[in-house]
Image: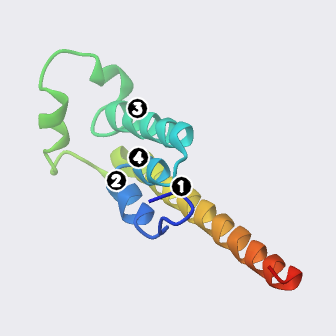
């Protein structure tokens, strides 16, 4: 399936699962990679630990992150904000592609193609 005939809607749940995955589905590899790295860094350093706490030996990061009683809203606010903005970016890309396709279709109808 080519990128032009591919439906846009699967990019939304893919981006909700992993930031940047929807961009890769739409063929925006570089942008998807940037979103993935940004989201990964936010999870690694800003979620469930501070930047200084992430580098200290002790409990593994995954164990600390899964202890929901120790996780507060500020710990997950930045990764959640990055994921939300990533979803908005996928929506705007899809909106731009749909608008461009409609404009191209209207131009073809006017030209009699």
Tell me the element at label 2. helix
Q: CA distance from mark 2 to mark 3?
A: 18 Å
Number of the front mark, 1 or 2: 1
Q: Residues within 10 Å of mark 2 (few under 14, many from 20)?
A: few
Rendering coords of residue 58 (x, y %): 13, 20
Residue beneath the point at 55% across and 36% down: 30
Res 41 label: 3
State the residue at coordinates (51%, 36%).
34
Which quadrant is home to the N terminus? bottom left
Q: Quadrant of residue 55?
A: top left
- Mark 4 = which residue? 79
- Disc 4, SS: helix
Q: CA distance from mark 2 to mark 4?
A: 11 Å
Pointer 4 or 1: first along the chain: 4
Does the CB distance between marks 3 and 1 fall below 8 Å? Answer: no
Badge 1 local density, few (<14 within 10 Å), some, or many (20+)? Answer: some
Q: CA distance from mark 4 to mark 1?
A: 10 Å
- Of label 1 and label 2, which has the lower sequence position? 2
Q: Earlier in the sequence, mark 2 or mark 3?
A: 3
Q: Nearer the viewer, mark 2 or mark 3?
A: 3
The residue singled out by tag 1 in the image is 85
How far is mark 3 from mark 1, CA to CA?
15 Å
Using the numbered discs, state the Cα–Cα distance from disc 1 to disc 2 in whole angstroms: 18 Å
Earlier in the chain: of badge 4 and badge 3, it is 3
Mark 2 lies on residue? 73
Is 15 placed above or below 32 here?
Answer: below
Q: Is residue 17 left or right of residue 110?
A: left
């Amino acid at each position: 399936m080519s990128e032009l005939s591919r439906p846009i809607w699967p990019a939304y749940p893919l981006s909700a699962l992993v930031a940047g995955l929807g961009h890769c589905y739409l063929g925006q590899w570089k942008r998807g990679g940037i979103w993935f790295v940004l989201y990964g860094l936010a999870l690694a350093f800003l979620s469930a630990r501070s930047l200084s706490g992430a580098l200290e030996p002790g409990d593994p990061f995954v164990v600390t992150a899964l202890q929901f009683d120790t996780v507060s809203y500020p710990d997950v606010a930045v990764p959640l904000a990055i994921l939300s903005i990533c979803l908005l970016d996928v929506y705007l890309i899809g909106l731009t592609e749909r608008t461009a396709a409609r404009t191209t279709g209207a131009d073809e109808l006017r030209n009699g193609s």
